[in-house]
Image (cartoon, helix red, strand yellow):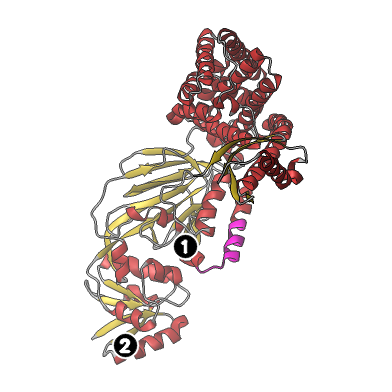
Amino acid sequence: MKHYYLQTNEDEDLVASVVVYAKAQEVELVLVDIASVETLAIEEGEHLLVSASLEEIKKVLHLASEKNFSVGIIPRAEQKEFKSTFELPSKLEEQVDLALKPCDKKLDLLYCDEHLVLQEVVIGEVPPLDSFSTSVEKLSVWERLKSSFSMIKKMNALTHTSFIVTTAKEKVLNFSAIGAVGVEYDNSTFASKLIDKHLKFNDARLSLVVLSPSSIFEYMGYIFQSHILKQTPKTLPSSVGYIHSHKLHIEAEKELSVTIDSVNSLHTPVTLETKAEALCLSVGEKFWEKSSAVKEIKESVKVEHLPSDKEMATYLEESIPLFSHASHEQFSSLFVSLREESKLNATFMTLLILASMIATFGLYINSASVIIGAMLLAPLMQPIVGVSMGLLRQDTSLFLDGAKTVLIGVLAVIFSAVFISWLVPLERLTSEMNGRLSPTILDMMVAIVSGVAAAYAKSNEKIVGSLAGVAIAVALVPPLAVSGIGLAWGEWSMFGSALLLFITNLVGIVLAASFTFLMLGFSPVAVAKRGIFYALVLVAIVSVPLSVSFVKMKHDIDITEQLSSFKTTIHQKNIYLKNIVLHGKEVRCEVVASDILSSGEKRELKDLIAKEISEEIGEEVRVLVSFWYEL
């Protein structure tokens, strides 16, 4: 058996090894300098081998597609990405065996302005989409970290430009991006890994993967996932889009470099086109397994989530911001809604007073379900979100409207609770009331998280209904109702503690919602600094009594746990404590004894309990107990 073997003088050692192995397999190789390939008399259906540089191999493959002969490639040691793309073996003997087998399956070929593309065509700057995951996986954690930081540092130089892409079916797509990667096969780049389910070797389609980060945080998230965690996102990242088509004409408002298989050779505009079933190439079995033969010529586009309006494109062309920038449409829609909801009106007051009445009665009858119903009905969250945006944007009108509505709403709730308390002839502190009298720093954490959820839900029309859940989580009306009850009873401590819980929720929501709106791009950082600072100051002030309360709560829990493990024996009578409640220097608990205690034994027990916790709360301990006896 005889085969032509196209080679260069640079591959002398490789060629010598191949020839020796082929001869052992009773295969004769006719060596031909690759420079004379076009003058070589090659018949249709013939099979030949090649070892050369990537550019020289591409010339042979282009000729093979025109003259309809098959090719087997024996790659150089440094052509790792090429071997990975076509799943070629790592051992020389296996490479030669594969290259000697003619292939009857035909591959599509990708061309960029008549230039053959074997691995990828990169338009603009798209790190890390154009990186090969096979190379990254071999790096140490430290090397991956350095690579990630290097890409992040380059963000200052990366800017968006407007793209106009016309598909084979004359569909015109407009979006803003920093660049794109065109691929034909699953070649182990991060771009191909994101869309590997769509990549087939003979579907007559090319794939363009577009990178369009709207914030540095968004970009950092993708780099962290791909480079540090070495994970491929299960869903397409918000900064990435794709287009599958037979042909794409790509224009960019700003001229971008076009790199074909790591060689920078063109500039936009360019045309990418697939030549269907153009080449018989001997590739590894895994190549067929990961790219099943499916005839699929339907165009597929997913770029609608990328920045597309002119205002957004102009903003991103200057530099990629730290946080994403809301579009004019998003900004206008949200502000119209917030301005309307921040104004005091009859509907707001009616719903709020009804919610106050329901909450107050729910507190008296100690019903959590009734109180939750009041939380759902109360519209107090809406103007608070408006206050957050007004503070963030330094929008005096929006801030004052929201603050006025919140203040009048707070007074309405308190005085509604006072009025009901005067009508109800009961002064019994229920557990639902008591639950609002000891706010701690944990309540601030709940308020902050709820504020994030409220702002995010408000900025997204699809999930705005989630505000009801946020209202339940943060509970604005019930603590105000408890304050009103305390005011009616003349219990100033009750009034102040419950009001502190409401203030905690209020400042926590304002801070978190303002910061969330900033991250979502509804305000420039320069404008937002002052508002965020004011909110932080308020949170810091409120956090002082909350921290003190938290420390006290932790102290009480420690003492309670200490008494829960208390066991003693007095005159052969076994004794332990349960249901322990601590109020300052007063201990209330149930004493379980194996027999009735005498007066002297009771005094001895009291001294033992006081001694057990004297270091924590002092010697003056008052002990109130009820006795249970085990039979």
Quadrant (top left/top right/bottom left/bottom right) for the N terminus:
bottom left
Q: Please state the horizontal and vertical placement of residue 413, each as a whole percent of the image.
A: 59, 14
Q: Please state the horizontal and vertical placement of residue 482, each as a whole percent of the image.
A: 60, 20
Disc number for residue 133: 1
Q: Which of pointers 1 and 2 indicates the residue nearer the eye?
A: 1
Residue 561 or 390: which is nearer the viewer?
561
Disc number for residue 22: 2
Q: Quadrant of residue 620?
A: top right
Residue 31 or 142: which is nearer the viewer?
142
Secondary structure mostly seen in magenta is: helix
Amino acid at circle 2: Ala
| Element at label 1 | helix
Q: Which residues lie in the magenta part?
A: 138-150
Q: Please state the horizontal and vertical placement of residue 322, each as a whole percent of the image.
A: 62, 42
Which residue is at 32% across, 68% downward? 286
Q: Is residue 548 above or below residue 351?
A: below
Q: Please state the horizontal and vertical placement of residue 574, each as a whole percent of the image.
A: 59, 49
Amino acid at circle 1: Ser
Residue 112 is covered by the magenta coloring = no
For this view, does 626 lie left or right of residue 273?
A: right
Q: Is residue 481 visible?
A: yes
